[in-house]
Amino acid sequence: MVLAVNITILCLILWRHGSYSSIIPIMTGTCDSLKHTSLFVHLAINVASTLLLSGSNFCMQCVSAPTRRDIDKAHDHGRWLDVAVPSVRNIRVLGRKRLLLWIVMGLSSIPLHLFYNSTFFLSITHNSEYNILIGTSEFAQGASFYNPLGLERVAAQYPNGTIEMKDESFEDNPSGFILDHISEFQRLGNRECITAYTQRILSDRSNLILVTSTTPRDDSFAAAYGNRAELWTSGANGDMAPFRWICNFNFYCSTLYQRIRDNPSTWTVFGFTVDYCLSQSPESQCSFNAAISLLIVVIIFNIFKVVAMGYTLRALQDKPLITIGDAIESFLVQQDSYTTGKHLLTAREVRSKGLSSLEATESYWIPVGPGKVQLRWWRSASKARWFIAYFGLFLCMAALIFLIIFAIHGVKAAGLTASEVFQLGLGNIDPRTLIYLPFGPSEDKATLLSILIANSPQLILSFLYVVFNILFTSMSLAIEWSRYHQRPRSLRVSHQKGEQRSTYFLQIPYRLGIPVMIFSVVLHWLISQSIFLAKIDDNDFTHSTSTCGYSILGMLATCTGGLILAVFAIILGSRKLPPGMPLVGSCSLAIAAACHAPDGTSGLHPLKWGLLPLEDRGKDDAVGPWGFYNPPRAPDS
């Protein structure tokens, strides 16, 4: 379904645009009007991405699920396999075809998470061309333009030549232009004016009037200048800052302007002492774009994933043991010879003692009885799995906190207050919250590096989803296993027969699996709005560059989500398991040991695990006093 939607969107964009282009603007308008579109589109993208991740995880678990033949072979060689949980341990027993499917489904997820969220993105318009006028306060109120050189066309005359004005309406009648757009002009003090026009990106500043009360000392300067503010990145153009007019075209203006800003009362431009500025402040303009090349890459790897999922269905014909019910049924039909007499074996014993000296003890399981302490859910997963999950989460949280500190430093340098930061919201492109990386002049290099930086957290979050999913699966497996001691229950299997129950989404119940999936969608979406691809376009469409934008609000929300995940797993793991059964986890040896049952025990009918009736106990240890059996049914009334 996701593949079909992606292909449909690609065809509609190309059909509407009429020709192929690497990046196609879909919508243009003010940044405020487009940010909501971006939010909802990226929410849809992350829903689709999570569905693909969950489906891929499902198929990878099915492919890596061992068959009964795999388990028998492993037991014969003194090894054990994982049952009913996603496992890397089982890779060693996979055949070539199953291993290839597992690798294809895993690797095809990488480009999806690296590129999917950047297939649609916002770009902001940089007002690279703006006019600078010098005039008296009367001119700013509509008086005639002061032109001491008597030029017929408004132009800038200075020793290096003449530059025509950049706006024809401005050029023909600057006074009339001012009056027609007077509501867009804002009065700024000299310090504010210099700060505003020395920003790397001018999105909400345009034409400028420098109001002066002095007259020119000679005829070397006119009263107007058409400025070309090229996109300026550190190291790209040496020291040729696009605001060199502030320093009367001094080559070192990129550093000299700070001294001028610190002494604003002495600021002079072209021989005129500036009293204050009138700055045109239009609304920031943005475009919502589709990266066609990235969308095609996503579709290609989406196809690989769909094909691999299709072949996975064929792999299921070997009837792998996907659920704990599948394993119980298999060991009841053909009991495991390696674990004969070890009916109380636990997963912890297997991991701690090794396979060479396995003996059943009661040290790691709690039978029913007064004063017995119940085991907690967290024991169902190994310490290594808990360590990987929380160490990975800790590293991510540490990196996120570092980025938050970096972002706070950036917004402070930009002069933003706390309320302004929160008003920016999520995923909002703003010149003050852009990351200015030391790119060279190569636009392709800047775009690729920005995409990788913006989407690498998506890949890390997908890894955390998988490892925490293993924890939740292990705990769900343990609770289902323990309930067979409480009352007779039908097996939940992949292929339902008799009185058996059909499976839900692998081992995780819907009441846990669906909320975890929704939570994953929200976290992926928050990350996509915390650091994201941002494109900057000149207003004359001659040049553009790419970088990353960030949202402190999004980072804080993501950090909160990570804390919620950590606390939720701990609370879930602290719940008590029903007492009475040895804790086998996903260990095939421990599961097989508990499934030695009397002859005639059938997995097609409800089963109970516990102390066997006297007539069902074996004369030797092949069938011990504990095991699965079919309890007698109450006669129909």
Image: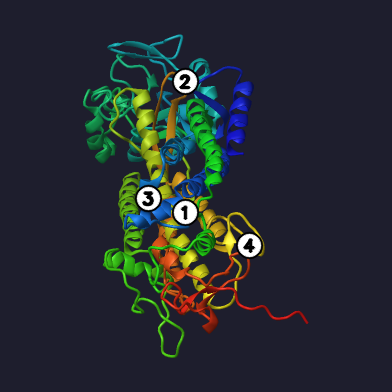
What residue sits right under mark 4 in the picture? 501
- The secondary element bearing badge 3 is classed as loop
The amino acid at mark 3 is Val
What residue sits right under mark 2 in the picture? 541
Q: Residues within 10 Å of mark 3 (few under 14, many from 20)?
A: few
The amino acid at mark 4 is Arg
Instruction: Look at the numbered discs 1 and 2 and tell me whether their residues touch, using CB distance below 8 Å.
Output: no
Give the number of the disc on residue 68.
1
Depth-wise, is mark 4 or mark 2 nearer the camera?
4
The amino acid at mark 1 is Arg
Quadrant where the image shows the C terminus: bottom right
Spatial separation of the CA atoms under disc 4 and disc 2: 63 Å
Spatial separation of the CA atoms under disc 3 and disc 4: 28 Å
Q: Earlier in the sequence, mark 4 or mark 1?
A: 1
Q: Earlier in the sequence, mark 3 or mark 2?
A: 3
Determine the residue located farthest toward the front in the rendered image: 619
Q: Could one spot residue 164 in this view of the protein?
A: yes
Q: Earlier in the sequence, mark 4 or mark 2?
A: 4
In the displayed structure, would residue 392 be above or below residue 532?
A: below
Instruction: Look at the numbered discs 3 and 4 and tell me whether their residues touch, using CB distance below 8 Å.
Output: no
- The secondary element bearing badge 4 is classed as strand
Q: Quadrant of residue 453?
A: top left
In the displayed structure, would residue 97 be above or below residue 72?
A: above
Q: Is residue 348 left or right of residue 11?
A: left
